[in-house]
Image: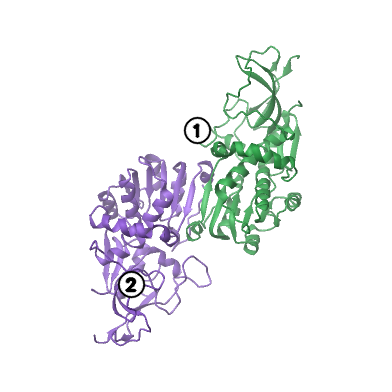
Chain colours: A green, B purple
Amino acid sequence: MAPVKNGRVIFNEIPSGYPDPNKTVIYDESEIIDPDTVPLNGGFIVKTLVISIDPYMRGRMRDPSVKSYSPPFPLGEPIANHAVGVVIRSENPSVKPDLTGLRILENKEGLPWSAYVGIAGMPGQTAYYAWKEYAAAKKGETVFVTAGAGPVGSAVIQIAKSEGLKVIASAGSEEKVAFLRSIGVDVAFNYKTTKTAEVLAKEGPIEIYWDNVGGESLEAALEYANKNARFLECGMISVYNTEPYPIKNLMNVVSKEIKLYGFLVFSLHEKYEEEFYREWPKRVASGEIKYTEDAKQGLKETGQAIYEVQKGLNKGKSVIVVSSE
Amino acid sequence: MAPVKNGRVIFNEIPSGYPDPNKTVIYDESEIIDPDTVPLNGGFIVKTLVISIDPYMRGRMRDPSVKSYSPPFPLGEPIANHAVGVVIRSENPSVKPDLTGLRILENKEGLPWSAYVGIAGMPGQTAYYAWKEYAAAKKGETVFVTAGAGPVGSAVIQIAKSEGLKVIASAGSEEKVAFLRSIGVDVAFNYKTTKTAEVLAKEGPIEIYWDNVGGESLEAALEYANKNARFLECGMISVYNTEPYPIKNLMNVVSKEIKLYGFLVFSLHEKYEEEFYREWPKRVASGEIKYTEDAKQGLKETGQAIYEVQKGLNKGKSVIVVSSE
C-alpha cells in the first residue's frame, strides 16, 4: 500500500450557539502515513469506513472547565465518535479489542456497515436498552416520542408499535412526518406548525414520554401525562444550542406521581449489549425495523453534518462515509 | 349527654394567592346535635380530638373544574382532613371502619393522640414509605432535605441519620434551623438568608434530594446532584400560593442520570402501612424519633392555622385541638 492521507477533523473553536460548519471543526489532511510501515507498537491499524454524527456531540464542544458526563473535545485535537472500520494490519494476532468501546462486528445479518453506527449501533441501543429498563409499557398505553424521525426516536416508535401501544410522535418537517407515518405512528405531527400541547390535549393522556428534546415538549408532556407516567429522559436537543425554555409545571411530577428516568446509553451496556446484538440486527435485516440514513461522502463534510444534526436538517441518521472496504 | 355544638369549618372562598385567615374558610357553630339521640343509621358517631393542618390542603382549595390528585373542597361545605377521634356511640358493634381511610388506633405506645396526625400519622408515613421505596440510601451518602423542620422533613432527616447519611437541610427561620441541629442535621441553614446553591456547592454533591418545596431549591439540587442521584418529589410548597419559579437546568437529569420519583403517600399505604404501625410509633415513643408540634386550641383557629402552614409560620406540626377525651 502506498502512503495515504490520514485525514482528521480538528476541534477548532468552542461554539457559543449552533456550531459553525466552517469554524467549529476543520478538516486537516496534512498528515501522510504509510499503512504498511507505520509503527503499531503491538496494536493494530484500522481503516475507517463510516463515522456517526450524533446530537450529543454538541455537549463535548465545550470549555473543558465545565464538567459533564462526556469528556470535552480538546481544542486543536481530532474529535472522535462511534465509527466502523476494518483492521488492515495488526501486531495483535487476535485483534482483541483492548480499548474501551471497541467491538468486533460479525455482521452475520449482512447489514450495511453504516447501520452499525445507527439503527444497529449506539442510537438503536439507546432505544432498545432504555425501553426495556424504564418504559414498563403495557399494550394499549399511549407513548409520545419527540424527534421521532431521528435514529433513536424511530427505533423507539417501532418497538412501541410492536408491543401494541398507541404512538404519538413529533418531528420538524413534513418529510419527516411522512416518514413517521410510514413506520406506523398513529398521530404524527410537525411541532413547528402544530402546538405539541394541542395534540396531547386531544390525543393524550400519555403513559410514556420519550424525551429527546426537553423544553416546551417536556412541559406539554408533564401537562398531559396520565397518573404514574414514565418519562424516559434521553436528551434535550432544545437546550444544546439555545437558551433553555423555562419549565414551570413540575408540580405535575408530584401530583401525577410521574417518574423521570435520566439515563445514558453506556450505563446500560453491560446489562443489555449481548441481548441487543443477538436480537436487534436480525429485526433490522428482516425489514421489520426500518431506518433512514443521511450519508455524506468524505471526512471534510463533518462540519456541515454536525451543523445539520444540531439544526435538525438531516434527513435520516447522519453518517460520514470515509472509505469503502 | 346534653346537646352540643357540632362545629364545622366551611370552605368559603377560593384563594387566589395565600389563603386568607378570615375569608378562605369560616368557622360555623350554628348546628346543634344531641350525640345521644342523633340518628346513626347503622354507623357510629365520633368526637374529634385533634385535626391535622397540612400543606397539601392548599391544592384542594381550588376551582372544581381543575383536575388534580385530591378532590377539590366543595364551596359552602365543611372541609376535611386527617383527624383522631373517639367513637362515643355506635350501632355497629365492631366499629368496623368501613369508610376508606379510617383506622382503629391501638396506641399501645401511649403516644399523645396528636402524634397520630403528625409524626405517627400521614406525614410520618410519607417519610417512612417513600424513603423505603425510592431513596436506595447507602451509608456515607449525602441527602438534602427541604422544609426540614416540617413533620415530613424532620422524619426524613432522622431516618437518614439513623442510616448513616450526611444530612444537609434547610428551613425558613433561625428557630427552625436550631431544631434541625437538635435532630442531628450536619449542615443546617436558613434558605431566606443563605442561598441554597451556595450551600450545596460547598457541601455537595448530593446523592439524594427530598423535595418538599420545588422551585429554586429543586434547581440548586439538580445543579449539585451527583451522578445517579435520586430525587424524592414529595411536594412543592413554593408553587402552591405563588407563581412557579422557572426551571432551566433539567438537562442535568439526562447528563447525571438523575431519577425523579413523584409520589403520593396513599399510593404506598398498601405496601408499607402495617410495617409502619408495627415499627414507627415505638421509635417515636422511645424518644429516638423527635418531633415538634404547633397546637392551636379550638376549631375556630383553623383558618389561621391553614394560613400559617402555607406561609411556613408554624413552629412544628400544625394541629387543631378540638376536644379532650
Residue at figure coordinates x 33%, y 75% from the top left: B95
Residue at figure coordinates x 56%, y 35% from the top left: A62
Residue B99 x, y percent position in the rendering:
40, 73
Which amino acid does the dot numbered 2 rest on? Thr
- Mark 1: secondary structure: loop
Quarter of the figure with the C terminus of chain B: bottom left
Q: Which of B287 and A104 is in front in this view?
A: A104
Q: Note whether B47 is above or below A300 in the view shown.
A: below
For the residues carrying marks 2 and 1, which lies nearer the camera in this image? Answer: 2
- The chain that hosts pointer 2 is B
Residue B138 x, y percent position in the rendering:
38, 42
Q: Quadrant of residue A77?
A: top right
Residue B149 x, y percent position in the rendering:
32, 55
Residue A131: numbered disc: none
Q: What residue sits right under mark 1 in the picture?
A: A65
Q: What residue sits right under mark 2 in the picture?
A: B302
Would you say B167 lies left or right of A149 here? left
Residue B1 x, y percent position in the rendering:
24, 85
Dots 2, 1 in contact, CB < 8 A: no
Q: Estimate the spatial distance between the alpha carbons at disc 2 and disc 1, rounded to whole Å.
A: 53 Å
Q: Note whether A99 is above or below B3 in the view shown.
A: above
Q: In which quarter of the image is residue B5?
A: bottom left
Which amino acid does the dot numbered 1 rest on? Ser
